[in-house]
Image (cartoon, rainbow, N blue to C red):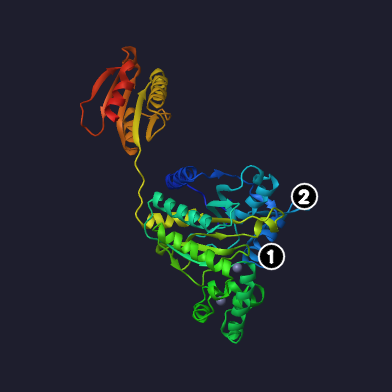
Amino acid sequence: MEYRSVRGMEDMLPQDAWIWHYIEARARQEFAASGYSEIRTPILEDTAVFVRGIGDTTDIVTKEMFTFTDRKERSLTMRPEGTAPIVRAYIEHALLAIAPISRLYYVGPMFRAERPQKGRFRQFFQIGAEVIGSGSPFADIETIAQISSMMTLFGLKEFKIKLNTLGCRDDKAKFAVSLKNYLEDKRPRLCEDCVSRMDKNVLRVLDCKNPECREIVKDAPNVVDSLCQGCAEHFKKVKDGLNLLGIGFEEAKNLVRGLDYYTATVFELTHSALGGQDALAAGGRYDNLVKDMGGSALGAVGYAIGIERLIIALKAEGIKQTPETVVYIATMGDDAKLEGMRIAREIRVHIGLGNIVVLTDVGETSLKSQLRSADRSKAKIVIMLGDDELKQNKATIKDMGGKEPQVMVEIGSIVKEVVRRLC
Ligand SMILES: [Zn+2]
Ligand SMILES: [Zn+2]
């Protein structure tokens, strides 16, 4: 019997852990500095949270959810996105009573039964942010500025911000009518998916990847012509604000998002390393969702970054792991082995848990093979200790870079000696 991971669900292997830590640590740092607090919601929710939240005609809800019935015949779904559960939790725990504006962030796995392809998995990880409680364009500006600084903190340079607006619910409905009128006589040329979108969710025709559909929507009506005065002003303020802050963006009139809850501002971050489906992050305003899910009428804006896709982009820009400094303690004999562990603990406590790794031998191998292990782990310093040396209360320190001669020192001064050589 050979076991394999479930299709589209990947193991994170130890050799790749560093880049996940790199991203998550920087994201948490940026969120903390911007006044966001973390929220963790369960992976399973009542299916209704997503059907109501995301929309019952969206691709996610109709085709991509992992939904099952539990032993008590309840329909549960593995979360396909983070916003609907957060709004559910926001209302359930009355977070509005704590602060008029909540800045929340999350990091965790999401699940969608899509066809696995480059950077797209059935279990995938997102870092996301939600600002709930403001309908102001300044919340949009701050959110887009924040994701942009975070990308810079990750060291990412070649990303683009694409911006559009969908208008309020009335504008969206008005735009849907004019788009449908435009598409009606072109229906025979549209792909099969778009033909069904025409009746269910016509805006989605705009972001179809089919080349023929793309050609057709090039001359489609522009959403800005369907905006009410309030939404037109909102969009203008967002653009002016970003310009003033020096945050580059391009207007993308055919940018719509695949979730029904978006209204007004929508945006995407794209990167050329991701190919045809080039978004590595996306977000927008969802001013009706809190009320639709049973809460107060509150404006909200948020985004999610796909971590696997961000990793592809960072690697394409040549990100490298910062090497750790390794201290290897090679020991011969039982007493020396335990003394080696004691020394290792002392060094760790003294130096702190920075980028320094102290390794000891637990394989009971020969000195020669321990020195090979030290070499393999690119140890900078090797401490050698046998039962005989231990009797004299001494150990040998070897500088693998060869800068300093190999010396024997008192065990009591090893930590001082290691610190002197490393710092
Ligand atoms: Zn409007
Ligand atoms: Zn299409």
In the image, farthest residue toward the bottom: 185
Is the shortest distance between ligand 2 and the CB of mark 2 under 8 Å?
no
Q: Quadrant of residue 172?
A: bottom right
Coordinates of residue 214 in the picture (x, y in percent): 50, 77
Residue 218 visible in the snapshot? yes
Q: 295 or 260: nearer the eye? A: 295
View extreme (top): residue: 392
77, above or below 56, in the image: above
361 up-or-down from 226: above or below: above
**Closer to the N terminus: mark 2 or mark 1?**
1
Where the C terminus falls, by quadrant?
top left
- Of residue 85 and residue 321, the one placed in the foreground of this image is 85
> How many neighbours does mark 1 have within 10 angstroms: few (below 14), some (14-19), or many (20 or more)?
some
Q: How many marks?
A: 2
Q: Which labelled disc corresponds to residue 71?
A: 2
Taking the image as shown, residue 419 lies to the left or right of residue 348, namely left
| Residue 87 at x, y percent in the picture | 65, 52
Quarter holding ligand 2: bottom right
Q: Secondary structure at mark 2?
A: loop
Query: Residue pushed farthest right?
Result: 72
- As drawn, the label of residue 104 is none
**Residue 117 shows up from this direction:** no
Q: Which residue is mark 1?
A: 56
Residue 173 in the figure: left or right of residue 140? right
Q: Is residue 330 above or below residue 123?
A: above
Q: CA distance from mark 2 to mark 1?
A: 25 Å
